[in-house]
Amino acid sequence: MKVHRLYPPPGREVSGIYEDLNLPPPWHGDSARPYVIVNMVSSVDGRTAMEGKAAGMGSRIDRRTMRTLRSKADAVMIGAGTLRAEKLSLGLDELGGVPPPLAIIVTHTGNIPLEDHLVATEEQEVLILLSDRVPQGVVERLRELAQIMRTSADSTGAVDLDRALQALKAERGVGVLVVEGGPGLNHALISRNLVDELFLTVAPELLGGTAAQTLTLLRGPEIPSRGRPALELVSIHLADGELFLRYSLPRTPASSA
Ligand SMILES: NC(=O)c1ccc[n+]([C@@H]2O[C@H](COP(=O)([O-])OP(=O)(O)OC[C@H]3O[C@@H](n4cnc5c(N)ncnc54)[C@H](OP(=O)(O)O)[C@@H]3O)[C@@H](O)[C@H]2O)c1
């Protein structure tokens, strides 16, 4: 399969996508929280799920790219909705030789089908992230399935994501975190200015669907113009009609800088 890097110019054929990426980038400096990247796939018409699932969107190269990004990270995080949607792995599969990243699932309800939906090898550690408002009975039940990290709650009682990221770095040594959605968790992180880069695969498909079925990259209230991140395009790769876009998100939204 031929892969072309289209941007930045000059365009040229390359041997792979993101394989030589160094994260965090040297200019990142010493931050109290991990370097956070979001990785997602969408159709050309902007949908991120088909019949409620992401499986089947994106090609074999997209799946390989997802694992390449995981191999650069200390941890991979998803929201509970993504785990409820389908069976999935947060590991490295064919990229043997590299230890698998810590798998993190964020939930408030504790309703996560870990045993049925998470495919994990014995060597992969699994951590459930909860706020300190979650009832003790729920915590005890989940403790039988995986490790637990409890952090302070935000005004809604959910995990205060800013504090949680700081705790992941300080207590678990997470320097680079890949977030693989879903749209609810993406929105929560991006609207709080907690994401450094977005990796988006645009699959050459048009899915259609009603407004109610149309899940995009972010699920949540419209982000006010003052808080919107000014995305900077970093690179574009093309492989068999599929586009691999990489954007950086400045730490301070452009309109409030
Ligand atoms: N195309 C792609 O690349 C891609 C990637 C991932 C997912 N998806 C699709 O996205 C859909 C799921 O979307 P979604 O928005 O429901 O999923 P989601 O973002 O994975 O999950 C949302 C849930 O995460 C938990 N959560 C988020 N922020 C939290 C916080 N601050 N504190 C505590 N818990 C928090 C809550 O779980 P509780 O409800 O348990 O409290 C919340 O309901 C599925 O159809 C999936 O296939 C697509």
Image: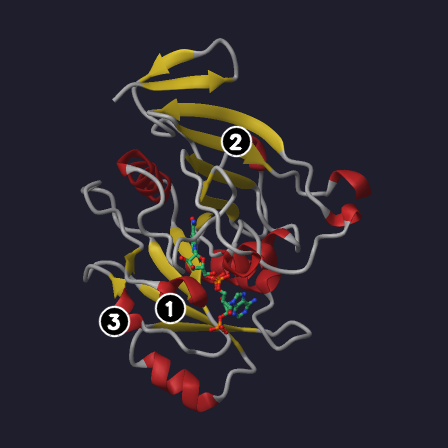
Residue tagged 1: 84
Locate residue 210 relative to residue 99 in the image: left or right: right
Residue highlighted by disc 2: 26
Instruction: Choose mark 2 or mark 3, whichever is in front.
Output: 3
| Disc 3 + disc 1, Cβ < 8 Å | no
Q: CA distance from mark 2 to mark 3?
A: 40 Å
Q: Measured along the vertical axis of the image, is residue 192 above or below residue 5?
A: below
- Residue 125 spot, x, y in % from top left: 29, 62
- Which residue is denoted by mark 3 in the rendering? 116
16 or 21, nearer to the observer: 16
Number of residues whose C-alpha sits closer than 10 Å to that of mark 2, classed few (under 14), some (14–19) or many (20 or more): few
Image point (77%, 46%), residue name? 225
Q: Is residue 79 above or below residue 207?
A: below
User: Residue at position x 48%, y 60% from top?
Assistant: 168
Q: Which residue is at the front of the view, 33 or 78? A: 78
Residue that extends furthest to the top in the rendered view of this protein? 10
Q: Is residue 257 visible?
A: no
